Amino acid sequence: MKTKAPFSLLVIAFVTMFAAGCEIIEDPEGTDDPRDNMTGTWQFIENSAKSTQSLSYTVNISKDPDNSSQVILENFCNPGTFDVQSVGIATTSQIVVTEQTLSNGWTVKGSGKLEGTEKMKWTYSITAGGDIEEYTAEATKL
């Protein structure tokens, strides 16, 4: 019987050391954030349903610090300044811009879908001065 006590202590010591070595360490950067692939500067090539000419402009997309499911889009729909911002809801593969009135008076709504990590396809509309115009755009991450 004396031999079982040291063996039991040895097993307990081994299990304790093993459990201590399996500590789960969480990544403070939060690499599981679906917005990570969407943030950055994007080059938009925009096409209007009413015109045959394309327009090129950049949009900055950043994480909304106050809401973990939203992004902030600067210069979305090309109002000509990064001071005009819209907000989008981000999922794992797309951004949805619900209807909202921008600070310049335009009303915008639409969505963009990721195609890989460097491309997005967008469809959206702009209401300005009572006129509604539909657009499509291809965006490439810079």
Image (tube, rainbow, N blue to C red):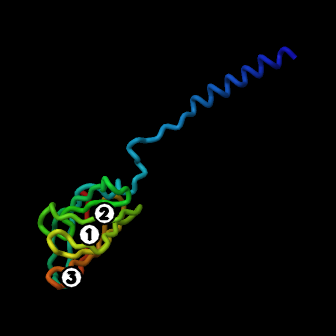
Q: Position of residue 136 (x, y in %)?
A: 26, 76
Residue 138, label in figure: 1
Q: Residue at x 15, y 61 (%)?
A: 83
Q: On the picture, is 56 further left or further right than 123?
A: left
Q: Which residue is mark 2?
A: 119
SS type, badge 2 = strand
Q: Residue furthest right?
A: 1
Q: Nearer the viewer, residue 65 or 125?
A: 65
The answer to which of marks 2 and 1 sits earlier in the sequence is: 2
Residue 35 position (above or below residue 53): above
Q: Which residue is mark 3?
A: 133
Q: Quadrant of the N terminus?
A: top right
Identify which amino acid the numbered label 2 is placed on: Lys
Q: Position of residue 132 (x, y in %)?
A: 21, 84
Q: Nearer the viewer, residue 35 or 117?
A: 35
Report the mark closest to the observer, 1 or 3: 3
Question: How far apart are the two marked residues, 3 and 2, measured between alpha carbons?
Answer: 23 Å
Q: On the picture, is 112 further left or further right than 132?
A: right
Identify which amino acid the numbered label 3 is placed on: Glu
Q: Are marks 2 and 1 in contact (CB under 8 Å)?
A: yes
Report the mark closest to the observer, 3 or 2: 3
Identify which amino acid the numbered label 1 is placed on: Glu
Residue 9 position (above or below residue 66): above
Residue 38 position (above or below residue 5): below
The answer to which of marks 3 and 2 sits earlier in the sequence is: 2
Q: Position of residue 93 (x, y in %)?
A: 39, 64
